[in-house]
Image (cartoon, grey):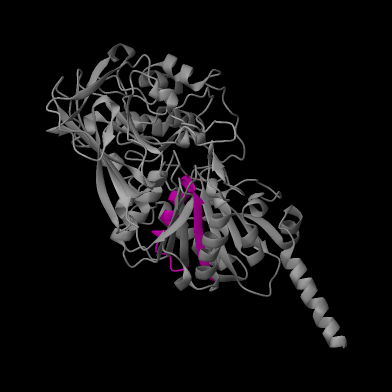
Amino acid sequence: MKRTCLLIIILFTFFTGYSQPIDADWVKANYTKREVMIPMRDGIKLFTAVYEPVNKSEKHPVLITRTPYKAAPYGTTFSSVLWESYGDYCKEGYIFVFQDVRGKWMSEGTFMDVRPFNLNKKKKTDIDEASDTYDTVEWLLKHTKNNNGNVGVSGCSYPGFYALMGGLSNHPAIRAICPQAPVTDWFMGDDFHHNGAFLLADAFNFHSSQGRPRPVPVSTRQEGAPFYQTDEYSFFLKTGAIINFSALLGDSIAFWNKMMAHPDYDAWWKARNVLANCYHVQPAVLVVGGFFDAEDCYGSLGLYKAINKQSPDTKLRFIMGPWSHGAWNSNDVSSLGDISFGMNTAAYYSKEVEVPFFNYYLKGKGNPDDWKKVIMFFSGENKWKSFTEWPPKKVEMTPLYLGEKGKLEFTAPEAIASFSQYVSDPSHPVPYTDKILRYRSADFMTGDQRFASRRTDVLTYQTEPLSVDMTLGGELLADLKVSISTTDADFVVKLIDVFPDDADNTGGMMNGYQMLVRGDVMRGRYRKSFEMPEAFIPNQQTSVSFRLNDIAHTFKKGHRVMVQIQSSWFPYVDRNPQQFVNIYQCSDSYFVKSAIKVFHQQNQASRIILPVLSK
């Protein structure tokens, strides 16, 4: 009887302790913190915060995050990330490591944005972010008590780039990495450029803050005076040409000045394209991204495809949800802006995907044979779907043709001569949202486009109401036949889900809603080559074809498919002066109007090519 009572007490204590909410008090009672300076192979030391479980009865895996954004808080204060985001890992007894990357905050050395990966390091002074990760892991294995010899590296956004560098380090103890919305190519599709077009607002706001020099290690910094007090549209329009923004920043923002010196996709940019180096990736990889991520949707999609192609033996998983940048790490993501997803999509990701991934490769728990290799959330119908690869095999690339009088049809046009036209005026650029904002919001990626439909410098085409559901899953292409009256122009293509006029019986807000599903921009001068830009010949027909980011969306029966075409998307994208000049160096006087024609006729049929997923 005594033994039975004792067993009950032990089990009660165990289960109540295990089920206790992971809050600040729990973490402080069950973890210790220490701060160390870890030496790299060239003598530079990196600031590192190490949180270790008090429990010494078992060996623990190590989970590393390397960041340029501060491995704070410094001193004895614990990071709230442990109980706000890492509660499940705390229960599992992980050792947590947060490190300031080289040249940032409390670490020594010189920082370099997206430092190129060096595959052929020969001298001790040959370093990159992969070698810094390798040296960090070596030190931790020797100086962290009770580690089990298994290391994971995780990070979101810029830290996602560093997570990938950990995977490329070839350290045998790194068993799993999780790059989330990683920075991969800042010219082609991440953060600061899309297809060569400069994402002005994001680039200026980021580099004016994060790009400031830090000569010596610091734990705090004095913030500079804000550059503007008005709404973003007014500020960026009033400031004018990009050369004026460079003057505001001065000479101290190194990467901004480098971007200004490299307007085309040259060797400098290519050295910073990590997608070219995804060969022989040894750790297991979980790539995470959001379909409504305005910053790094391209990075997630590109990284999965690069590893899948270049390193086919890598144990690779991929999940994309209906998320804005980093939203999957939130406690609840059931909607974005006006669009509901019908469930808490973040909870599914954390419980069913990320934690089991690291638990298996770092602790040997679970069974990966039960896992789905590719998991995608399809907005519109609000369902998770699984695939063996992405893009899916069962996809029919289906052209949808622009037509006369704003029609959008699945049959090719029969007209002999037909086009739509508009005048693009840089002094009155099309805004990316109808909201008055200080800084860009995340929800514009699902925003209502009715404001744009009302503008004369936006072409709008739509289908008849669909008779059946149509599900799109995979790569989305734009193939435009155009002419312009000047020597350069941008082309923004938006794919939109038009809700029925009786869609909402609870107030009418969603009646006729024009949901942005996918939108992207192509700088016209790069239509033939990103390395060798080419001027348009005024009023001569030419093709502008480009790939938008992948899509996973169902257009429901009764909805319409809409396509909008415009030549500005401000200030998300900088204004093209619409002349073939160096956009980073030209003055305000170079900005001119351009008459744009988009053709929809027999021999010049503009179209959007949809990845229609078969049932």
User: How many numbered marks have been drawn onto this rendered protein structure?
Assistant: 0
- Is residue 449 left or right of 307 when viewed as pictured? right
State the residue at coordinates (26%, 52%): 396
Percent across and percent down for residue 407 are 28, 30
Q: Which residues are magenta?
A: 149-173
Question: Is 320 placed above or below 242 here?
Answer: below
- Is residue 324 left or right of 560 when viewed as pictured? right
Percent across and percent down for residue 150 are 52, 69
- For this rendering, which residue is in front, 346 or 591? 346
State the residue at coordinates (66%, 56%): 34
- For this rendering, which residue is in front, 426 or 270? 426
Residue 156 belongs to magenta span: yes
- For this rendering, which residue is in front, 241 or 3? 3
Question: Is 341 placed above or below 604 here?
Answer: below
- Give the quadrant of the C terminus: bottom left
Instruction: Residue lying at the far top in this picture: please name it.
Output: 589
State the residue at coordinates (55%, 67%): 359
Q: Is residue 525 visible?
A: yes
Q: Is residue 115 visible?
A: no
Residue 97 belongs to magenta span: no
Percent across and percent down for residue 365 are 55, 73
- Is residue 485 left or right of 448 when viewed as pictured? left
- For this rendering, which residue is in front, 394 or 428? 394
Percent across and percent down for residue 193 are 35, 35
Question: Is 45 placed above or below 462 here?
Answer: below
- Give the quadrant of the N terminus: bottom right
- Report which quarter residue 297 is drawn in: top left
